[in-house]
Amino acid sequence: MQTCSALKQDSHESLCEELLRERAAVLSRAGFAVEDALEKVIKIDRHLEEKMNELRTRRNNASGRKNLPDQVSIYEEINAIIDQYNTACQKAEIQYYYFIVTREALGLRRHETVRQ
């Protein structure tokens, strides 16, 4: 039979383990949020690059003739994608900030590897 102090010790260790698991889960969620936000930025950047290449191709193919409605619509598409990109970058910055704040709250002070 365990003594009272042994039961308290087991209970304390169990509680500490649960707190460590919770800390790891919180940090993991914050890290995944940053990853997701950065992946979205990269995806939008690729889409923007595709549209820019499409615009260059259209310009080269239409060297003598002006396709003004087509050019206007592709410019509008590019501007919309740029707006999406800027919004995604802002969200990624916020998620990164939350991640750093979470690390700080958990006692992790060195963030050099995170920045890389």
Image: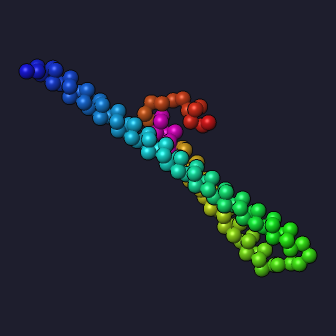
Tell me the chief SS of the magenta region. Answer: helix
- Does residue 95 belong to the magenta stretch? no
Q: Is residue 108 above or below residue 101?
A: above
Asked whether 98 or 25 is in front, the reply is: 25
Residue 1: x and y, percent? Answer: 7, 21
Q: Residue at x 76, y 62 (%)?
A: 53
In this view, 93 is above or below 4: below
Return the x and y of residue 50 as percentages of the image width and height. Answer: 71, 62
Can you say which quadrant of the picture contains the C terminus?
top right
- 78 displayed left or right of 112: right
Instruction: Identify the coloring.
Output: rainbow
Residue appearing at x 81%, y 65% in the figure: 56
Residue projecting furthest to the right: 64
Q: Is residue 12 left or right of residue 7?
A: right
| Magenta stretch contains residue 103 | yes
Q: Is residue 111 above or below residue 53?
A: above
Q: Which quadrant of the figure has residue 114? A: top right
Residue drawn at the location 35% of the way across and 38% of the way down: 22
Magenta span covers which residues? Answer: 98-104
- Image position of 73 (left or right of 33): right
Direction from residue 99 to residue 76 in the image, left or right: right
Q: Where is residue 99 in the image (x, y as percent from the top left)?
A: 50, 42
Q: How many labels does the image show?
A: 0
Q: Which one is in front, 109 or 80?
A: 80
Q: Residue at 18% across / 24% down in the picture? A: 8
The single residue placed furthest to the left in the displayed view is 1
Q: Residue 84: image x %, image y %?
A: 62, 62
